[in-house]
Image (tube, rainbow, N blue to C red):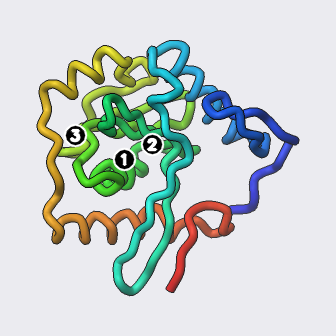
Amino acid sequence: MGHPLVLGQLEDYVTGETLDDTADERLRQALARLLLDDLGYQRSELQVRRDLPIDTGSHAATSRVDFVVVIDEKALMVVRYSAGALVVRERPTVCVARLLEPHVIPRAVITNGRDARVLDASTGEVVGTGLQAIPDRAALVELAGSVELSALPAKRRAGEERILLAFDALDEACGCGPTLEH
């Protein structure tokens, strides 16, 4: 895998920051517009490009989370972008939802910008497919009222970190994705 072709600069739709204009970044920006303009989230409820440190003891890495939806100071959904087949990115996306906060984030979304898979992060089950299945703000608030936000036991967290490292950090050959340290 090579480095992405940079076409210039663009403005991040959520933060206003200047970013490299790549094909992947254009799709991420389209996702930001979907979340804000169509699904009703507020800019203040979106955390963008959040890093997740992974440390298995023998390896350390950093994984990137494209969007975290935080409502009333509770992270309720992660959205990750990945080009290509979504099914192979379901498990690492669930890992992110289980590791990013002290509690398991209820919804995990993996999308390539044209399709999406929405997962229950507690069970790993697919609960919806397609961009239209991504919960809007009202549905996510309703979900938050019906689930208990609980932490994973330490042993399970360690396992999730190893899985995420194997799926996410070790397959980034060009070095422009997650960083791996020995």
Q: Are marks 3 and 1 in contact (CB under 8 Å)?
A: no
Q: Position of residue 116 (x, y in %)?
A: 44, 31
Q: Position of residue 19 (x, y in %)?
A: 75, 43
Q: Are marks 3 and 2 in contact (CB under 8 Å)?
A: no
Q: Residue at x 23, y 49 (%)?
A: 103
Residue 84 appears in the figure: no
Q: Residue at x 34, y 29 (%)?
A: 71
Residue on which the image places disc 1: 90
Name the quadrant containing residue 102: bottom left
Mark 3 vs 2, N-terminal side: 2
Name the quadrant containing residue 158: bottom left
Instruction: Label 3, secondary structure: give it.
Output: loop
Residue 37 appears in the figure: yes
Q: Residue at x 42, y 49 (%)?
A: 89
Q: Which mark is residue 86?
A: 2
Q: Which mark is residue 27?
A: none
Most foreground residue, 151 or 178: 151
Disc 3 residue type (three-letter): Glu
Most foreground residue, 158 or 41: 41
Q: Residues within 10 Å of mark 1 (few under 14, many from 20)?
A: many
Residue on which the image places disc 3: 125
